[in-house]
Image (tube, rainbow, N blue to C red):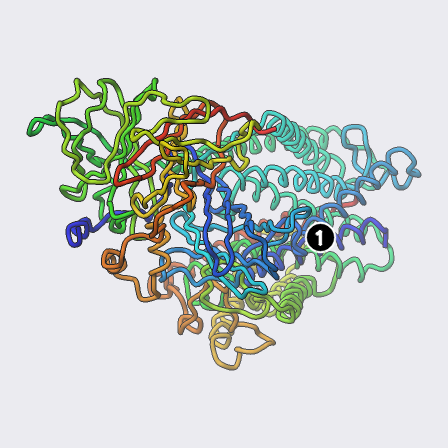
Amino acid sequence: MPWYVAAAVIAATSAKVGIIWDISWHRSIGRDTFWTPAHMAIYLGGVLAGTACGWLALRTTFSGVGAERDAGVRFWGFRAPLGAWVCIWGALAMITSAPFDNWWHNAYGLDVKVLSPPHVILALGLWAIQLGALFLVLSVQNRARDALRLYGVLAAYMIAILLQNVATIGIEQIGFANLAHNGLYYVVAAGAVPLLLVAAGRGVRLRWPATTAAALYMAFSLVMIWVLQLFPATPKLAPVFNPVTHMVPPPFPLLLVPAGVAIDLVMHHVGAGRDWRLAALLGVAFFGVFFVTQWFFAEFLLTPLARNFFFGVDQWDYSSRVGPWRYRFWRSDVNPVTPRSLLVAALLAVVSARLGLWWGNWMARLRR
Amino acid sequence: MTSRPFRLAALAPIALVAAAHVGSPDTFFEGAAGPYTVRVIVRSPGVVPGLAQITVRVLAPKSVRRVLVLPVYWDPRTAAPPPPDIAARVPGDSTLYGAALWLMTGGSYSVQVTVEGDAGTGTALVPVMAVATRRLALQRSLGAGLLAFGVFLCVGAVALIGAAVRESGLEPGADPDRRRTWRARVAMGVSAAVIAAVLLGGRAWWNAVDAAYRSGLYQPPHATATVRAEGGGHVLRLAIDDTSWTNPRRQWTPLVLDHGHLMHLFLVRDSTLGAFAHLHPLPLDSTTFDAALPPLAAGRYRVYADIVHESGFAQTLVATVDLGTPAGTWRPSDPDDAWTGNGKGERGNVADLADGSTMIWDRSAAPIVVDQEAPLHFVVTDPRGRPATLEPYMGMAGHAMLTRTDGAVFAHLHPAGSVSLAALETFQLRQPGDTIRGALAKRLTTMPMGSGERGAVRSGEVTFPYAFPQPGPYRIWVQVKRNGRILTGVFDANVGPAR
């Protein structure tokens, strides 16, 4: 495996670990500085991706052998693989966001809202590093004659990282099992998840690509849940209504493996060239399986059986006034699952699957 | 003065961005933390949520093991504080400790300063107002740097999309054909349009955040001062005519007595600063306060009115008033009212007081510098040059009011610092069950007045811990009480910029 692919994958992993760690930090300790380990993991991702890909671009441009130069795309007179350029762009975006974010805090207050212009630039940078790493893996996978399985798993892993992004951004809509009896929950999940799983199904060279990506997504979450709970933490910001003693883990991941299996089975049986029909089948199959499995799995997650280290669903933010709401479904009275919301979700799943096929086709063609 | 103030329900901030003093956002405190005397300075971050910097100096050195600081929000329903922070000893200074305070909610906090040492453990409470007072400008260099990076990122993104469409799907070594090149150009055009739209959206978003922030900057409630003739004299009326004052949704807590008065009102003659009055208007209702007007010279006056809420929140109302020809008689509406028409009785650092005694500003020739502890130490001597015995004036050995000539700064200080003693008392008396408005204020009224000086000060000395917040020319009025008479010394100071 080329060293720069490994560097990009490690960088993307570090940044994602940092993001999940940072969210846990804000839910457990509350206050932070620039120099928290979570922030360091995030910026390590940016620095590693930026320097590795920057060096790759310089080397390929100025001293690359023919094959290396031929496997690059031109960018303002320089040559490097597309993924490397995307990683470099992401690193620059992260660098830009840091002084902007510092000024923003001084001007308008400390993280008054998570969603702010400098944070959006940071998020774009992180996404670029993750996408860049995916592109690098795919270009190598698509040119490789051996080690296909390794590159396939790595590509599925990068799709899993992107699924983690969906879970992070959608934490208020699809993060907690308590929301899984809401109409919005399924609308958001159906809109976002098939795009990635179907793209994996088309672009990742494995027998069970969507299943693998889904499994890796869940494994990533589980590792974070289990590891974070091991670290002691003390809340340092008022009000402290829930005196947690250890880092609060992220919510249990979406149960995506059955839906991934469904996507892979449909793609095994419907070949390429009939993508509109395939998208309809994929969308319906994904949504049907996901809705049924997640609905009942969420019910399980709210039972006493899930209140343990393995599932980690009994741990809440230091600022929470803990109560029976922890084990109830939220807002299911004001935003219930209705035939209309199910229909909207199914249609969105079809649209998302069609977009996933387009993107997956491009991914399957990526050579540089 | 027991029940009437408490008809003033529904006052005091919660959507609160407010602060005592004008143009002087930092907090200064000097007092006892058990067996230790501490001088505490809290530098306001100017934004909320924000990080305030606190320094604690342990005066009269004793063996100190550690100093702990903890900001506690006033409302017991939401306080739930975390463990305190250990203030780090400042390198090179064995008595100075520093830490950062996380003030996450706008409003009134008490900072608990705990000193642990061989003499035991003692705690001082320091009232601090968390308010947004300023909008930070984007420095030209930072703006230019961000713009350059932004342009690079946008142009780079367009070029990347072009490269992706043109070449990324080609076998290594192959050259793009005309069709791919054309498609790449279309993709670049579309992406440029999308990025432009995103930038416009981002600009609108930033502007909206900025506008919302500006609207939340602290402004004291609007007040209007007027004068009317009554019974051979003149009466000054201050009316708080701000819609937020009576809006029940603002959830203001009631006003509390500070040194026995609901309001401390100061009149400063505009431009010349040649006349000054310290009055204590009586409330007619929750918005209107009246005081008999002393025979000040005609002219325009700045009006500053200090009030304190049950939440511990102190703020200064600001107004102006034009005074006509003074009335012949003045019957003070409060025995603590005082005024001086002395334009500038100072000879260097010496001021002649009305009873023949002298007030000396005990300072070296060293220049006074902005943001550095100012030597506000004054000595009063009797006509024979001996230290005068000072009586408590509203519970304090002295009061100092200072203003920058242009009015950009006005502060009311005591030997305990810039903090309001009433705010301090609300925090000392507050109990977890104080969730009913007015309950704490009622207890405050029944206790003997003041956390300040209770006995006479025989040394004739009075010191005010403070640091001037802005450079420029200042006038300082120092008020003390001797033989039952309120005496005012007037001084001028030039404050230099930070070095």
- Picture quadrant of residue A223: bottom right
The spot of residue B289 in percent (x, y) is 18, 38
Given the current orientation, which residue lies at the most extreme front position? B384
Name the amino acid, label 1.
Ala
Tag 1 residue: A12
Label 1 marks a residue whose chain is A
Q: Is residue B234 above or below residue A258?
A: above
Say if residue B10 shows up in the picture.
yes
Where, quadrant-wise, is the C terminus of chain B in this rendering? top right
Q: Is residue A48 above or below residue B343?
A: below
The spot of residue B275 in percent (x, y) is 29, 23
Q: Residue at x 59, y 28 (%)?
A: B143
Given the current orientation, which residue lies at the most extreme bottom position? A305
Instruction: Tell which of B166 and A221 is nearer to you.
Output: A221
Q: Residue at x 39, y 60 (%)?
A: B78
Say if residue A278 shows up in the picture.
no
- Picture quadrant of residue A366: top right
- Picture quadrant of residue B365: top right
Number of numbered callouts drawn = 1
Instruction: Tell which of B310 and A342 is nearer to you.
Output: B310
SS class, disc 1: helix
Given the current orientation, which residue lies at the most extreme left position? B231
Question: Image check: B98 left or right of A91?
Answer: left
Question: Image check: B270 left or right of A142?
Answer: left
Q: Residue at x 51, y 37 (%)?
A: A107
The spot of residue B483 in percent (x, y) is 28, 40
The spot of residue B321 in percent (x, y) is 23, 24
Would you call the spot at circle 1 few (<14 residues within 10 Å), some (14-19), or many (20 or more)? many
Q: Residue at x 20, y 33 (%)?
A: B238
Q: Is residue A313 above or below residue B85?
A: below
Instruction: Tell which of B222 and B235 is nearer to you.
Output: B235
Question: Image check: A124 left or right of B166?
Answer: left
